[in-house]
Amino acid sequence: MPAYTETIIYIFALIALGYISVAFSYFKAEVSDNLTAFIYKVGVPLLLFKNTLYADFQSGTVIQLWSVYFGSAACIWAISHLTIQKAFRRDARAGVVAGVTGAFSNSVLVGIPFVSGVYGDDGMAVLSKILTIHLPVMLAATIIQIEWASRRDGAADGAINFIQLLKNFIRQLLSNPLVIGVLAGFTAKIIGFYPPSVANLLIDNISATVGPIALFALGMAVSRYGIAGQIAPALSLVFFKLMLMPALVLCVAILVGMPDFTTKVAVSIAGLPAGINAWVVSQQFGTGQRLAATSITIGTGAAIISTSLWLLITNTVLQLL
């Protein structure tokens, strides 16, 4: 049995416990909102602050990592969008929901405990480098796509106001707790401030709760969404997210000569299921809710197998090269 098997079982067992707790009415589904709020507003910002503060961004590998990962994500976003819009004949707004679902990995709720459990602190260092710009990049893409799709589908009139678009992006970005955590870490690094031991103890202990609580809350959220139809298009998005995106990241990483360990972590992150961001976008649009809900539920369940598969594939390919 591979060494990472216990970690994968642990991760999805916690998700299953969260799912069961709502399915059997032990907790109300709304409890997941409070747990998720703690993760996003307290736990992860503190974790990102510390990881950003101590991360090494001087290496050229960082630019290489960002180029490989986000270049691949852009390709998958486009493929997902066009598939739903052209093959399944949905509107442009549903295409945006599909793009988010196909390219936006659940790098916080699943990614942090997964990478930490499989790759340890070195893996978290790589994940942190992705997380520092993951939200800004994906948020910018989402806002632009939302504006474009709304006007194309007739939900808004007139040309795109890029000044207003930029203002909305900056406002949402600077008010996001995850971005605040990253910016605080960069600021502390620049001025040379390092927290005293007591503060580090506090940050470490709160950060240690992120993984278990995030996974349990995710299970509760999945139980709420469930499988709500749109099976065929949802399965296509799940395939793009769990299989095509990690395959693309692996191929591009090998072509550009990215270090093996960085490649392993990047492929693992790329192969994570879609998170609740797709649901949030679908709610904002008022379309694609069933597509997002079904994709999230099926993708989270299927990831039990696909994450293990990609760990095996990546290790094998890199050993052969």
Image (tube, rainbow, N blue to C red):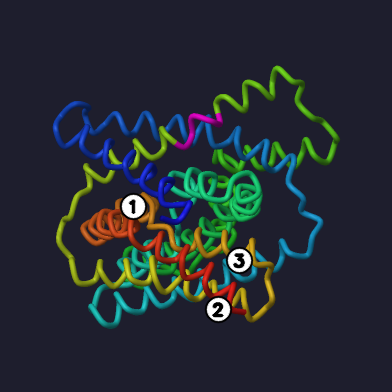
Left or right relative to 74: residue 121 = right
* Rendered location of residue 92, percent (x, y): 33, 72
Hey, what amino acid is under mark 1? Gln
Dot 1 alpha-carbon crowd within 10 angstroms: few under 14, some 14 to 19, many 20 or more? some
Hey, what amino acid is under mark 3? Thr
Q: Residue at x 58, y 36 (%)?
A: 45
Closer-to-camera residue (134/204): 204
Marks 1 & 2, CB-CB < 8 Å contact: no
- Residue range highlighted in magenta: 207-211
Q: CA distance from mark 1 to mark 3?
A: 35 Å
Q: Residue at x 75, y 25 (%)?
A: 195
Tell me if residue 156 can be seen: no
Q: Earlier in the sequence, mark 3 or mark 2?
A: 2
Marks 3 & 2, CB-CB < 8 Å contact: no
Q: Which mark is residue 266?
A: none
Q: CA distance from mark 1 to mark 2?
A: 35 Å
Q: Earlier in the sequence, mark 1 or mark 2?
A: 2
The residue labelled by disc 3 is 263
